[in-house]
Amino acid sequence: MHDPLSDVVRLLRPRAVMANPITAKGAWAVRYAEYGLPSFCILLAGSCRLSVDGHAPLVLQAGDFVLLPRTPSFTLSSPGEAPPPIPLDPLAAANTRGGLRYGERRGRPDLRSLGGAFAFDGGDAALLAAMLPGVVHVRGSARLAQLVRMVGEEAADAQPGADFALTRLVDLLLIESMRMAASDTAPPGLLRGLADARLARVLSQLHAQVDRPWTSEQLAKLAALSRSAFFERFRRVMGLGPMAYLLAWRMEIAKTLLRNEQRPVAEVAERVGYGSASAFSLAFHRQVGQAPGRYARASWQSPQLRQETL
């Protein structure tokens, strides 16, 4: 079967932008401003309290992994009584070399962890955020712990081939995180759909043959459901109808082809299942808010010029 999860990671093309060791001792608390990019943390030893804005607080223990797809403002503190939090800038923390220390500056730390963040060279980070809960909390995953440690080692050592190794490790880190989050308790979207055996078959075929002129009847047959039962189930689990999902995925692919590969509009139209460039351009404009040619030109320009064009 075709693997939609791999499709998403290939489209996003994630890369590590930083990975820092973090230690703490005594009573402490820090408050990070909103970062916006996905970030992660693995607790190697000790425990702490994590309070992410808009979510219930968590007590993290050694071996816990946390992924924040959007990284809003959050507070980290020692367990038990903690002082008022010290405000920190996430961008400044990301540029800190040699690690971060919270609380008492001297002595053996009570807590050791590794925190990092990544950006995407391909798709929009909003695609990942739409698939995942606001806080992904995994307890006791040896695979995730190993991957995060390897990311930290590659980021710190800067050995030959480190850039390539980091890219592959972050791919694996994302896939493992999404596997852990794929369940019927995930928010409506692809991960929840992949946890549904009937819809997983449909999603596999949609991703494998994105250029095929699919109909709701064909997709319902793949799911072994009536057309009405299939539509209701797909919409409840995925958060949108099957044709709307197919359109959204086609446009994500199209944006990547236009932005990163600079393909001609006619070729992109054919790749994502449109019989003519004009039909594709109309659909793209409705979905993205720009004509594909203008979107491509804005993407190729410098950030400053791109802002002016948009």
Image: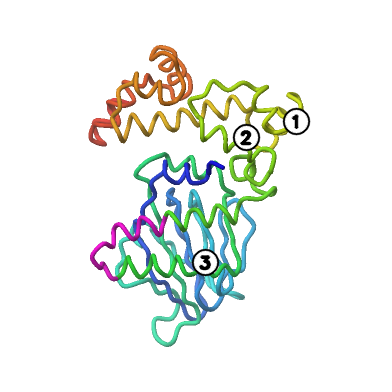
Image coordinates of residue 308 in percent, x first then y, are 27, 27
Q: Nearer the viewer, residue 56 or 18?
A: 18
| Residue depicted at x 46% and y 22% | 273
The circle on residue 306 is: none
The circle on residue 202 is: 2
Query: Three-letter amino acid code at disc 2?
Result: Val
**Which quadrant does the C terminus fall into?**
top left
Q: Earlier in the sequence, mark 2 or mark 1?
A: 2
Magenta stretch holds residue 161: yes
Crowd tier of the residue under label 3, counting other residues whose Cα lies within 10 Å: few below 14, some 14–19, many 20 or above? few
Q: Nearer the viewer, residue 98 or 287?
A: 287
159 left or right of 149? left
| Residue depicted at x 48% and y 23% | 287
* Contact, mark 3 vs mark 1 (Cβ under 8 Å): no
The circle on residue 143 is: 3
Q: Which residue is mark 1?
A: 225
Residue 81's quadrant in the figure?
A: bottom right
